[in-house]
Image: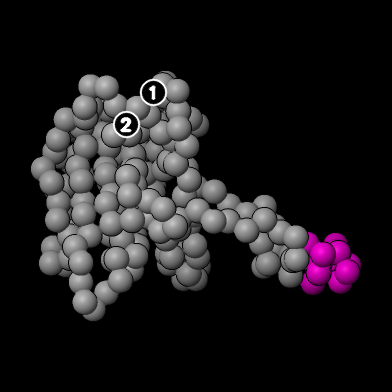
Amino acid sequence: MDSYIEIRILPDQEFEATTLMSTVFAKLHRALVESGRSDIGVSFPEAGKTPGALLRLHGSLAALESIMTLSWLTGLQDYTQTSGILQVPAQAAYVQVARVQSKMTASRIRRALKRGSLSEERALELLQSRDQLNQPFFRLLSASTAQKFPLFIEQRNAEKAGKQSVYSAYGLSVGGSTVPWF
């Protein structure tokens, strides 16, 4: 993994940066699914409470050239600035960029209550004590269920580059995959 592309969300009076980043991320997801690529990872160098305004795509030169030929950013050129394909700095650190999910969401608790596997008291207890995710997230639309859902991400430091470079259809880490961090 020696190359990367930066996609920066430009300031806009009509749209929030988080809305535009979610749109870019959703389009990237569709492009990765369409191409069948699992060799492109993502990182968010400016992430805080939100994913930030900078998305990096990481991969080989051939993988990045291939995904960019799909023109998946069509319609977003006025809202984004895309670099060419750049070389990863030699002394880059590594991170895992992974999806995180709450173990007990409100909808899971409601379903368990409805099927009778939880008492009302226990359900209320779980609702009040469930873990709240504070990581940055994207609000995405599921192609299979047509429902909106949050996709929370976490960027964890890695001691070294992962042995494999396989990523999900969202460009997120699978099985310990890492991306350069600089």
Dot 2: what SS?
strand
Q: Which residues are magenta?
A: 114-126
Q: Against 35, is 112 above or below?
A: below
Q: Closer to the camera, 16 or 100? A: 16
Q: Callout 2: 10 Å neighbours few (<14), some, many (20+)?
A: many
Tell me, for residue 161, which label it has, or none: 1
Residue name at image x 14 percent, y 35 percent: 86
Q: Tell me the CA gap for discs 2 and 1.
A: 8 Å
Which residue is found at the position 45% from the left and 23% from the top?
159
- As for residue 122 lying within the magenta part, the answer is yes
Q: Residue at 21%, 37% (x, y): give it.
A: 4
What quarter of the picture does the N terminus occupy?
top left
**Vertical arrangement, residue 174 with respect to residue 20, above or below:** above
Query: Residue 32 in the image: x percent, y percent?
Result: 31, 48
User: Residue 44: x, y in percent?
Assistant: 34, 47
> To which quarter of the image does residue 52 belong?
bottom left
- Which three-letter amino acid code belongs to the residue tagged 2? Pro
- The residue labelled by disc 2 is 180
Image location (x, y in percent) of residue 53: 28, 57
User: Is residue 144 at least partly visible in the picture?
Assistant: no
Examine the image and state in which quarter residue 8 appears: bottom left
Label located before the other in sequence (2 or 1): 1
Q: Callout 1, which amino acid?
A: Ala
